[in-house]
Image (spheres, helix red, strand yellow):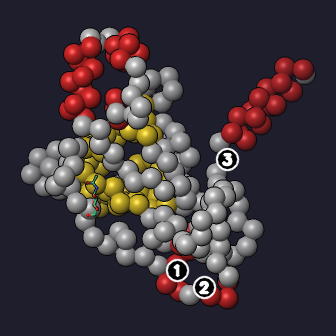
Amino acid sequence: MKTSLQLFICLAMLLSMVEADPEPLQDYCVADTKSTFFINGAPCINPKFVVSSHFATSALAKRGKTSGSQFGSNVTLTNTANLPGLNTMGLTLARIDIDGNGIVPPHSHPRASEVTICLEGALLVGFVDTSNRLFTQQLRPGESFVFPKGLIHFLFNLDSSKPALAVSGLSSQNPGDQISSLAAFTSKPSMPDDILKKAFQINGQDVSKIRKNLGGSSYFERT
Ligand SMILES: *[C@@H]1O[C@H](CO)[C@@H](O)[C@H](O)[C@H]1NC(C)=O
């Protein structure tokens, strides 16, 4: 009896830790993109001034530029700046353009699960769970895959000659992104070499080389 109660409390605590974004308290809260307040989300403009265009965006209409990308990909996201009507809705839409054999490198979203649909090309997608088990799937146009919240995942264009296009929905208006390689090797300030040497079982030259190769780049824009 006592153990089942403890189990129940543990489950309840675990469930409360995987909550989605807070529920909206009104029909909509169109983001005031000029506000300088920092609150959980963005402040709303007066509903009297809300118009249809606040709920529309062409932010994902164009291909993201991949030419400057060392990974051969570009992820374009909706956010409260380019789609103010999305504020408090707990949603993000992403357009993912991947060159031939390009990747969206292993990364995680601390605040969102993600469901992706392949629209063009041939993708290999996958994630690693917390027991270090890898799940992968090949996607053809029209096929979808789910990346569970917080888990490290990737997308790879299997075709060397044709670009791929995928669109993802994410369960937060601000999913957050951490690319595993960039978090380890290009943080500012840098993680101490001794930590990276031990963690990756490499020497100081390897650390410098990887840092240089990754070039201190950022990938996702911060919102
Ligand atoms: C992604 O594409 C946008 C629009 O073309 C561009 O402004 C941005 O710099 C690109 N990001 C990367 C990482 O190349």
Disc ID at residue 192: none
Q: Residue visible at 49% across and 60% down?
A: 92
Look at the image and tell me whether residue 180 can be seen: no
Mark-to-mark CA distance, 1 and 2 = 7 Å
In the displayed orientation, state which residue is furthest to the left: 161
Instruction: Check the image and report above or below for 185 versus 57.
Output: above
Please report the residue visible at 65 percent of the width from the left and 68 percent of the height from the top.
Answer: 43
Outermost residue, right direction? 1
Mark 1 in CB contact with mark 2 (< 8 angstroms): yes
Q: Label 2's element?
A: loop
Residue 87 seen in render: yes
Residue toward you, 124 or 47 = 47
* Distance from the alpha carbon under mark 3 to that under mark 2: 29 Å
- Disc 1 designates what residue? 54
Q: Within the displayed image, which quadrant is ligand 1 positioned in?
A: bottom left
Which amino acid type corresponds to the residue marked 2 in the rendered image? Val
The residue beneath circle 2 is 50
Count of number-bearing discs? 3
Q: Which residue is located at x 48 percent, y 68 percent? A: 81
**Residue position for label 3:** 19
Asked whether the residues under the numbered discs 3 and 1 touch, taking CB atoms below 8 Å apart as contact, a structural biologist would say no
Q: What amino acid is found at the position of numbered circle 3 in the picture?
A: Glu
Q: Is residue 40 left or right of residue 127?
A: right
**Mark 3 or 1, which is nearer the eye?**
1
Question: Which element type, helix, strand or loop, lies under badge 3?
Answer: loop
Q: Nearer the viewer, residue 140 or 34?
A: 34
Residue 191 falls in image quadrant? top left
> Dot 2, how many residues are within 10 Å of its Cα: few (below 14), some (14-19), or many (20+)?
some
**What whole-number distance in Å separates the C-alpha atoms at marks 3 and 1?**
27 Å
